[in-house]
Amino acid sequence: MRPLRAFALLLLALIARPNAAAPPPAAAEAVLGRWIAYEASSDTSSVIELYLEQGLLAGRVIEVRDASGLRIAPRCERCPEPLAGSPISGLRFLWGLRAEDGRWVDGRVLDLRPGLSQGVEANAELQLLNGELRLHAYLGLPALGQTRVWRRP
């Protein structure tokens, strides 16, 4: 077997292998409630509320604040109908997450950040690590996604 092919197969096996050191699933109580999400590209912070919806984890935006701490009222101009033009505050943007192997998986997230990606729906996973909640959103391959870190207020 060629060395490059052997390396590629080994790399694929390591990526596909479940993480044996993964912590147990975060109990719903550990992730429910309010979190602060900072968005560097717009220098804003959002208060996010996570809750259970028919046994699955979901989330909505409670409020958005600018860099000076003032409450602002952005709208989701690029969201699909019927959400187009809706205020982001109060909007359900995360849904369908179920607990599995130390993470919340198989969910969906609606990108609410201003710009070209606003309104794009993606796959979502959440993981609680050291008191921080990590939202990983991706289209297609998880390795090509983006992770955002949320903290408690």
Image (cartoon, rainbow, N blue to C red):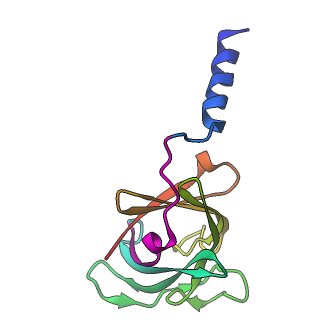
- Based on the picture, tell me whether residue 23 belongs to the magenta stretch: yes
What x and y, as percent, mark residue 48?
45, 79
In the rendering, at what x and y percent does residue 85 appear?
61, 89
For the N terminus, the quadrant is top right
Q: Which residue ends up furthest to the left in the rendered image?
A: 68
| Residue 84 part of the magenta-drawn span | no
The span shown in magenta is 21-39
Q: Nearer the viewer, residue 49 or 69?
A: 49
Classify residue 123 as left or right of residue 35. right
Q: Is residue 102 left or right of residue 109?
A: left
Residue located at (56% from left, 86% from top): 91
Q: Name the residue: 38% across, 65% down.
A: 40
Q: Position of residue 147 (x, y in %)?
A: 49, 57
Q: Position of residue 130 (x, y in %)?
A: 35, 57
Is 79 in front, or is 110? Answer: 110
Residue name at image x 55 percent, y 41 percent: 19
Position above or below: 74 against 43: below
In front of the other: 2 or 152: 152
Q: Is residue 20 above or below residue 152?
A: above
